[in-house]
Image (tube, rainbow, N blue to C red):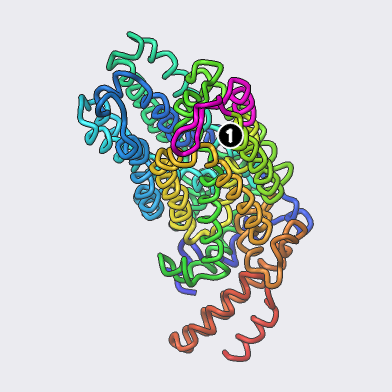
Amino acid sequence: MSTSSEAGTAVDPNRKNYAVDKPSPGEARFAKEKITFRVILLCILASMGGFIFGYDTGEISGLVAMPDFIARFGSNGGFSNVREGLIVSLLSVGSLVGALSGGPLANYPIVGRKGAIIVACIIFIIGTVIQIASITSWVQLMVGRFVAGLGVGQLSAVVPVYQAESAPKQIRGTLTATYQLFITFGILVAYLINFGTVKIDEGNSPSCWRITIGIGFIWPVFLILGMLFMPESPRFTLRCGNEERCRRDMVKIRGVPADDVALNYDIAEMKEAMAIDSKLPHGLGEIFRGKPKVFYRVLLGFSLQMFQQLTGANYFFYYGTTIFQSIGSPKNPYVTSIILGAVNFGCTFGGLYVVEKFGRRKALILGGIGMAASFLVFASVGFKLVVPGSQDAHGQGTPTKTAGYVMVIFGCLFILSYATTWAPVVWTVNSEMMPSRVRALAVGICTSGNWSWNFLLSFFTPFITNDIGFKYGYVFAACSLAGAVVVYFFLYETRGLTLEQIDEMYGTEGLKPWKSSSWEPTDHEILYKQRQELLSETDRYKRDQHGAGEEQHLDYVERSRRGDGNEESVAGFRSMA
């Protein structure tokens, strides 16, 4: 091999730590990474990106009901459907753009995952300043939300990748799910602050909404300061060719010696996978043509993010205060929103347990069924049990007091199902099932599915509810069931596997998603020797043929990556060479 190919990706057959200190096949298979306070702190700190997302989601729900906010940015004493929809949804448009740009930015060696998170926070701060400076211009307010959305979207694309690439495999699902936990925490905090600020001059002071928006300035500053002291993603530094920094960062994260056996094992596995990846194309084209099943995975990830929105969760979080005003909620609508936010936050702790205890597939399937059942009752009660004579031209009426109680209860049951399953698990699945060489780009594309449907729902919800009222819930119930069906037929179970093993699983021929929970990775010791020999043979073959056999080369490399016919692959190259 040439020196240039050895730097950063190729396997060095003479390296002491990997060849001599590697565990035996049986030990390697069950090697566990040490779980330290530092790795937990890293993932929790990065999850502040989710808190920023949640806070901005929760604050707008209360702002659009504040009298001074309505007087300054509304028209004729209220908001038209178009204006309210744009103010609420422009954050999602900005987030869509931010998600698509966040992945490529995070791939630049000079920026990396850490740098992309810091840049996103700076962008969000700029958007916050624009919003606070708005006096009566709803367009300026809307622009501020768009700019803030750029930062939120970039965080949503990069933070889960950073967490997945840094967390130990046995708790990777739990730690990446903290991103969703902090989203719910941010929503709850925003609800509480709105509840407090709306009491200032009974909501008739600009301080009511400016304080709420201004407090949002604190969270990105905190995240920036924290990230300055956190290590870069070890897999990213290794991909950039800096093995020493990768090892140093992993030592800090895991709290183990530099020559730790399990550490050597994992670095060896990463290097072998990256040695194969380095010979494959990168970039946007690989999303559509890459193997194994790259487009399949990206399309699946996009669909899961879409269905996460189509469950209808943000129907409550964006318009919760307005919804509970309309049903004649037995409590202050701000208080009801706080109750929903608290249920959401509390139940997400259960999601941290569910994602590892029951696995990704089972959680999403059962969660979809639970959400559908809750929305069916919510919609039926809201549509049927109305105050006599309160129907409007569209047949929609004001629910009775009893109906209001029932709807609040089933709204909470919906959030229980959502917060323990689809809310955290989708972020976990998206960040872990993508190939290393296109992970940041692929996750950004998938996350754009979340934000595009977030925009569509937040913008069109006022129009839809005006026409069909609470029957809107039937749409969300159907979508929740459809999401569960997609999971059953297309999603592979990834619990307990390393990111490299997940890549191998998606390349296993004939493996059905509904049988994937029983799949076991190929013994690492065998793959280690076969891939090392294969790389040596393929490099010699390419030099001899001057690139004439590139198609065959890539085919054999892919077969090695899948663990499919490795012995035949090596023998075939030997005969051709």
Q: Is residue 394 magenta?
A: yes
Report whether 362 appears left or right of 120.
right
Residue 474, how many percent across, how many down? Answer: 58, 44
Label 1's element? helix
Q: Amino acid at mark 1?
A: Ile
Name the foreground residue: 335 vs 345. Answer: 335
Question: What is the chief secondary structure element of the magenta stretch?
Answer: loop
Which residue is pictured at 63% across the width and 44% down the height? 173
Q: Which residues are magenta?
A: 386-410
Residue 115, how many percent across, how many down? Answer: 37, 43
Q: Quadrant of residue 374?
A: top right
Q: Is residue 326 above or below residue 455?
A: above
Residue that sits furthest to the top in the current view: 201
Name the foreground residue: 478 vs 39. Answer: 478
Residue that sits furthest to the bottom in the current view: 576
Which residue is pictured at 34% across the width and 35% down the height? 84
Name the foreground residue: 122 vs 367. Answer: 367
Which residue is pictured at 60% across the width and 85% down the height? 573
Residue 439, how many percent across, how many down? Answer: 49, 56
Q: Is residue 461 magenta?
A: no
Q: Is residue 369 above or below residue 557?
A: above
What residue did someone put label 1 on? 40
Work out whether residue 348 can be spotted.
no
Report whether 361 appears left or right of 434.
right
| Figure disc tally | 1
Q: Where's the C terminus, which quadrant?
A: bottom right
Work out whether residue 13 can be spotted.
yes
Q: Quadrant of residue 124?
A: top left
Q: Quadrant of residue 423?
A: top right
